[in-house]
Amino acid sequence: MGTAVDSLADLLFPRQCSHCDTWDNGWLCPACTSQIEFIASTSMHDLRSFSGVRALTQYTGIVKDVLHRTKYEDQPWRLIRFTSAVIENEPDLKWLDEIDLVVPMPGDPWRTWKRGFNPARLIAKEIVRTTKRPLAHPRWFTRTGSKPQQALSMDERSKRYEENVFRLDKRYLGQEERVKCLLVDDIATTGATLRAATAALTESGLNVEALVLSVGL
Ligand SMILES: [Zn+2]
């Protein structure tokens, strides 16, 4: 269904640059493309709390701006188009053939409800559209949230990540055991969230690869 809607959107709107809004017959114009630091998804990076994350771009200038406008100016279409363009630019996605299930990083429930979307899921959907790998059910892997993240102190935040805030719903598990999951998120800096989410998945016998749209190295 997503593909049909996206195709319709392609017909109705000119393919303007997802960042600067100029029309250039694509979701990223050459000027913006030249300012993005692309990273090959085949290479792995070590963060303070998580080793072996794959990334598509560096979290700089344009990437930051697209994510900011997506999240705080309620423009999810910007991230969808941007991700689509970044994936088109990625030369080697063959390693994704090994993936059995694409799993978006669960959003904080309160924030996701307020926004109406989870950025990680938008990115995961674009990966699914290109690779044809299956997308995890939204209730399969979730995250519990008590109060908005901003209201927590740094100590509370790191403590919360230590707790088991991620949850797998067994009703959606079963045949997925021992599958290779691709955990997808928009941004990784320290890697603390990736570490906690990966731990929750591996404890249930799943194999995990992590891929983020951007990484703050
Ligand atoms: Zn542009």
Image: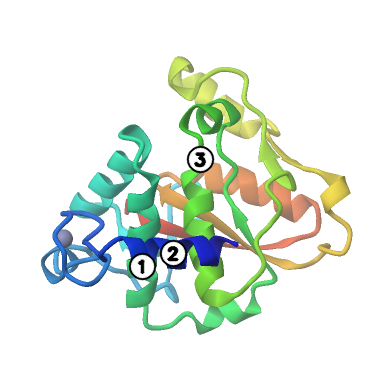
**Residue linked to disc 3:** 117
What kind of residue is marked 2? Leu
Image quarter of residue 136 = bottom right
**Residue linked to disc 1:** 11
Q: Quadrant of ligand 1?
A: bottom left
> What's the colour scheme?
rainbow
Q: Is mark 1 within 8 Å of ligand 1?
A: no
Front one among 53 and 126: 126
The residue mark sitting in front, 2 or 3, is 2
Against 12, residue 142 (above or below) is: above
Residue contact between numbered discs 1 and 3, judged by CB atoms under 8 Å: no
Helix, strand or loop status at disc 3: loop
Is 117 situated left or right of 161 in this image? left
Image quarter of residue 139 = top right
Badge 3 density bin: few <14, some 14–19, many ≥20, Cα 10 Å: some
What kind of residue is marked 1? Leu
Quadrant showing the C terminus: bottom left
Which of the labelled discs sits on residue 122, or is there none?
A: none
What kind of residue is marked 3? Phe
Which of the labelled discs sits on residue 8, or is there none?
A: 2
Against 87, residue 16 (above or below) is: above
Helix, strand or loop status at disc 2: helix
